[in-house]
Image (cartoon, grey):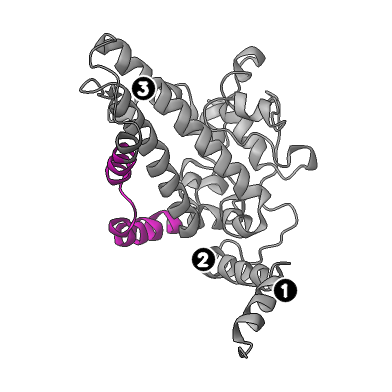
């Protein structure tokens, strides 16, 4: 009963930050619908990669060297691990590179978390993660089509990779919520719990740049950004320096990140190099 009352608090669903989540979900869906035909398709990239490998290494392995069930299992695991690492690393870059943080801060500007907060992202970030998915999956598909002719068929559950489906059942869909769901410490060393992702959103200094992972914890452990959850944790969310004014408005969600990105381009130390190259190019030749 207490958990239900906590879930349905009005400030979680009816606050300005929640309505910003709803707006970005609808607007971004419309934007991505318009631009998705212009983005790379994973099968197109996979075919291109396959052709390059086949040209460079025409002697492919013989077919049916492994039982099909083992190939399918290896392909599913490989694609899952590859995709999870790429998500982790791009997410890490979104925090480490100011040019990318200008857009990713839109997601972190949420001051209350609910399941719709996952859709709170700038379209530039959505495009980057879409390209990430395309490239990582295309690499997996091309590699296994090359190594195991006529044997690759990903095993899916409800249209989702099996391992991702299992993880979502275990609570990943509640990563953005006001419900604290933690795992035993031994399990959090393997899988990121919803509570660990909530720590990632915390403005406490001890939590900055922690728990970038989506499913597996090994990436954070390897890059020294791992942090255990605390069952009794009480966290405050948002931008720790309140740098993005009006961050629940459409202006703050869509325009300000672009302006900040443009300002960073003007301040970049490479600007001097660009100017020198430009002046040399414009210098009349004798």
Query: Dot 3 corresponds to which residue?
Result: 76
- At mark 1, the secondary structure is helix
Q: Residues within 10 Å of mark 1 (few under 14, many from 20)?
A: few
Measuring 30% from the left and 44% from the top, which residue is drawn there? 48
248 versus 51 height, above or below? below
Residue 254 numbered tag: 2
* Rendering coords of residue 108 (x, y %): 61, 50
Question: 44 or 101: which is nearer to us?
Answer: 44
Measuring 30% from the left and 38% from the top, which residue is drawn there? 55
Residue 272 numbered tag: 1
Question: 64 or 167: which is nearer to us?
Answer: 64
Q: Distance between the residues labelled 3 and 2?
A: 36 Å
Q: Is residue 267 left or right of residue 13?
A: right
- The answer to whether mark 1 and mark 2 are in CB contact below 8 A is no
Does the magenta segment cover residue 188?
A: no
Dot in front, 1 or 2: 1
Q: How far apart are marks 1 and 2 (CA)?
A: 29 Å
Measuring 45% from the left and 49% from the top, which residue is drawn there? 119
Question: 285 or 194: which is nearer to us?
Answer: 285
- At mark 3, the secondary structure is helix
């Amino acid at each position: 009963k207490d958990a239900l009352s906590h879930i349905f608090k009005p400030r979680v669903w009816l606050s300005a930050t929640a309505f910003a989540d709803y707006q970005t979900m609808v607007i971004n869906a419309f934007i991505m619908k318009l631009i998705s035909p212009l983005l790379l398709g994973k099968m197109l990239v996979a075919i291109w990669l396959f052709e390059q490998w086949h040209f460079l290494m025409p002697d492919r392995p013989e077919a049916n060297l492994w039982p099909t069930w083992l190939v399918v299992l290896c392909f599913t695991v490989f694609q899952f691990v590859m995709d999870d690492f790429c998500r982790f690393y791009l997410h890490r870059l979104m925090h480490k590179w100011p040019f990318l943080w200008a857009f990713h801060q839109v997601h972190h500007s949420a001051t209350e978390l609910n399941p719709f907060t996952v859709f709170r992202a700038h379209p530039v970030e959505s495009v980057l993660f879409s390209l990430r998915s395309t490239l990582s999956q295309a690499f997996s598909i091309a590699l296994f089509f090359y190594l195991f002719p006529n044997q690759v068929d990903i095993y899916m559950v409800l249209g989702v990779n099996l391992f991702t489906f299992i993880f979502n059942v275990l609570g990943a869909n509640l990563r953005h919520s006001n419900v604290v769901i933690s795992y035993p410490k031994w399990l959090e060393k393997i899988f990121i719990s919803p509570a660990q992702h909530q720590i990632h959103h915390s403005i406490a200094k001890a939590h900055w740049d922690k728990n970038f992972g989506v499913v597996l914890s090994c990436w954070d452990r390897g890059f020294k950004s791992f942090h255990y959850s605390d069952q009794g944790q009480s966290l405050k969310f948002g931008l720790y320096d309140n740098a993005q004014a009006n961050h629940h408005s459409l202006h703050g969600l869509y325009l300000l990140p672009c302006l900040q990105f443009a300002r960073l381009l003007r301040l970049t130390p490479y600007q001097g190099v660009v100017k020198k190259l430009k002046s040399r190019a414009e210098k009349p030749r004798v």
